[in-house]
Amino acid sequence: MDNNLLAYREAALNIKHAIFQSRYRAAENANAEMLNLYYGIGEYISVNTRSGKWGTGAIEAISEQLQGEIPGLHGFSPTNMKNMRIFFEQWVMELESNRQLAADSESRKSGNELALIRQTPITKINETKMMAFCRVGFTHHREILRKSKTSDERWYYVLRCANEFWSVANLKNHLRADEYSSYGSLPNNFILTLPDKQTAAIAARSFKDEYLLDFTNIKESDEYDELDVGNAIAANVKKFIMTAGDGFCFIGNEYRLLVDEEEFFVDMLFFNRDLDCLVAFELKKDKFRPADLGQLSFYLSALDKYVRKPNENKTIGILLCQDMNRTVVEMAVQDYEKPLGVATYRLGTEIPEPYKKLIPLIDGVQQIVTENTE
């Protein structure tokens, strides 16, 4: 290829990269400005409604007036304006200085000034958290506030959304699976089997104690075996990775191991980039039995000997079963030299026949609610 053409192609790629960076910064800044606006409006509504200055139906009347003043205005339905109030009231104590809050709120009860985030002293959170907060869209914030019970849980989802670019649908999946409560609590022996405490802590945070597998379309009442679940996960591997967490790369299901001419098959094999190691998932249909760990431990030995590369860390094994006695599990895993953890999984639940006819109606109501809150 002509040298000039190569140079032009490189120039075009550099310009394209700059365009994308500029667009991303513009979108990020626009989102931050929108959050500033919504936060300020939320405070304005909160001060006037909570103090009794505005009467019943004020938000509905103001919303209608806005639609008349600005034809085609979106995002200012009565429901969404109430969401702005919730947005302000749920975050104000963390985002602002206690020193200013009471005085500022009182001084604004009679005025029209909107206290936007950028105009308010931010003293309680670090820059990293603030950047993440401003990257996350208002719809994401709304979902997080609806489902999260504590400040730590809210920040968990805000940081994950910002750092991993979760869509709203992806966020809803993580919220529905109650990911915050599940991560880092599975019974394991990582502290005894991994090289240092930091690695063991990262490993513990990388796995959940319960995995929601309703995307497999297998119901708990169905007749199925472990192979059926493994095949369903493989067919929906993207959804499983969304459930399992970031950093997982799928290698295969029913992964074949050959040990002295004997064949063995690992139910699910992944590689975790954060841990720099292979991760074997073994599926069991029934309640946990200590003997199940022996099989998984053997698989880890074989993977370490025949599959693991010299620069990679020791293979980790996760046994997925439908039920477990945590005391039994915690006692059992301590006797193994291989890094093991045990978690449960949930399949989809069957909808009772009388309620199936209501599904189209429920879907229609959800669509109407969504349209009216945008």
Image (tube, rainbow, N blue to C red):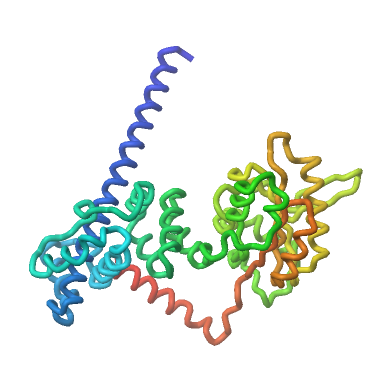
In the rendered structure, the answer to whether residue 296 lies left or right of residue 172 reads right
| Quarter occupied by the C terminus | bottom left
Position in image of residue 62 (x %, y %): 14, 71
In this rendered view, identify the residue nearer to me: 355 or 52: 52
Please tell me which residue is depicted at 24% across the width and 68% down the height of the picture.
81
Residue at the extreme top of the image, as rendered: 3
Please tell me which residue is depicted at 68% across the width and 53% down the height of the picture.
190
User: Which image quadrant is residue 229 in?
Assistant: bottom right
Instruction: Say how many tags the image has.
Output: 0
Q: Is residue 22 above or below residue 249?
A: above
Position in image of residue 193 (x %, y %): 72, 50
In the rendered structure, the answer to whether residue 290 lies left or right of residue 234 reads right
In the rendered structure, the answer to whether residue 154 lies left or right of residue 267 reads left
Please tell me which residue is depicted at 82% across the width and 52% down the height of the picture.
298
User: Which image quadrant is residue 291 in?
Assistant: bottom right
In this rendered view, identify the residue nearer to me: 360 or 74: 74
Position in image of residue 114 (x %, y %): 15, 60
Residue at the extreme front of the image, as rendered: 99
User: Which image quadrant is residue 145 in?
Assistant: bottom left
In this rendered view, identify the residue nearer to me: 368 or 109: 109
Q: Is residue 255 above or below residue 286?
A: above
Please tell me which residue is depicted at 18% across the width and 71% down the height of the picture.
47
Position in image of residue 104 (x %, y %): 16, 63
